Image: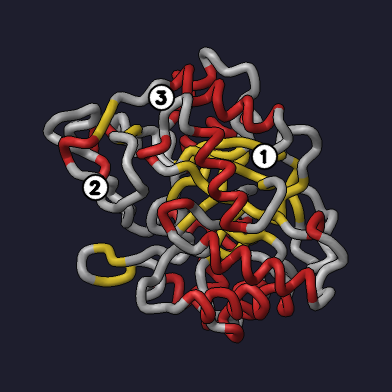
Amino acid sequence: MGKEATSAKIPVIQLNHGGVSMPVLGLGMAPNPAVPDEVTKNAVLDAVEVGYRHFDTATIYFTEDALGDGIVEVLRKGMVGSREELFITSKLWCSDGHADLILPALKTSLQKLKLDYLDLYLIHWPISAKPLPPAYPIQPEDFRPFDFKGVWAAMEECQKLGLAKAIGVSNFTRKKLEQLLATATIPPAVNQVEVSPTWQQKELIEYCKTKGIVITAYMPLGGPLGGHNGVMESSLLTEIANAKGKTVAQVALRWVYEQGITLVVKSFNKERMKQNLDIFDWELSPEDHEKIRSIPQGRVCDGLDYTSPFGPFRTVEELWDGET
């Protein structure tokens, strides 16, 4: 992972698409229905002020408009020198996961974001759904088979048109990446998946490194596992954090970063945003890593909402191809 820093002093990593540089830490813009758009917009300004340059959204997050308003304000106030200093990721929703709908979907996202291009456009899930307005969850009868060849060819066209500097996927297993790579002209630059100390994904990370695909971790601070947050309430991570004078969140984020991958973390609290950035000038010891390897493993995002008795994935085992 490169040592070059952005103006925000966040290291960057080179993607396999035309020398695109991606900040290794970004702010997740996942939805919170209780948060008004104005709060989301102001969070963007706070984030830029404290040093973030990468913002990660998606069609189904319904935060593209608010993020776009924030970007307009950031540029108007001169908080960055130009649009090129920002790295914006969005994701294709399943109901647009059809070869003829992908370019129109990207153009809709760009319109909401008030942008001419995305830095990174991802397929959100290896799943298609009946062409309807974006909605979550998908109704069981609305799932459709996923056309790996046709969908990826349309993603490649988006990049060739200059509407996305880099393209990639999310929630893809090794098996599904193999299926995509079998017909791809341009390999995916990124695979965004759940990674945290409680879901370490060693085999997938190593596989993607051999293919030149950068992993981006979502949910690096975990979430509810068996009635508690396996990361934030971990006694082992608390012990390491106390010994280092760091927070549990900082230890978890540093651990993810030390896997040689990138990450996005969501917080609209300015002080926590600052804390989450404070992971680059210290490191975990080999003993720390050995301890963290012993943490019990389990997915937070089990993918159950992406299965259906009508297929194409009837069980979570089918969705994840039995990979752990």
Residue topped by disc 3? 175
Query: On residue 305, which mark appears?
Result: 2
Determine whether 66 is above or below 106 in the image.
Answer: below
Q: Residue furthest top?
A: 183
- Please tell me which residue lies in front, 291 or 210: 210
The C terminus lies in quadrant? top left
- Please tell me which residue lies in front, 229 or 109: 109
Q: Residue furthest right?
A: 81
Give the amino acid type for the residue marked by disc 3 in the picture.
Lys
Q: Earlier in the sequence, mark 2 or mark 3?
A: 3
Residue 277 shown left or right of residue 93 in the figure: right
For label 3, the SS is helix
Mark 2 or 3: in front is 2
Residue topped by disc 1? 164
Residue pictured at 41% horizontal, 37% vertical: 96
Determine whether 87 is above or below 188 in the image.
Answer: below
Q: Is residue 288 visible?
A: no
The answer to whether the residue labelled 2 contacts the one labelled 3, judged by CB atoms less than 8 Å apart, is no
For label 2, the SS is helix
Where residue 29 sits in the image (x, y, percent)? 51, 64
Q: Label 3 vs label 1: CA separation? A: 25 Å
Density class for disc 1 (Cα within 10 Å; few <14, some 14-19, many ≥20) is: many
What is the total number of numbered labels drawn onto the structure image? 3
Q: Quadrant of residue 25?
A: bottom right
Q: Quadrant of residue 127?
A: top left
Q: Is residue 251 visible?
A: yes
Give the amino acid type for the residue marked by disc 2 in the picture.
Asp
Give the amino acid type for the residue marked by disc 1 in the picture.
Ala
Residue pictured at 34% horizontal, 33% vertical: 128
Residue 307 shown left or right of residue 72 in the figure: left
Where residue 310 sits in the image (x, y, percent)? 14, 30
Residue 203 shown left or right of residue 261 in the figure: left
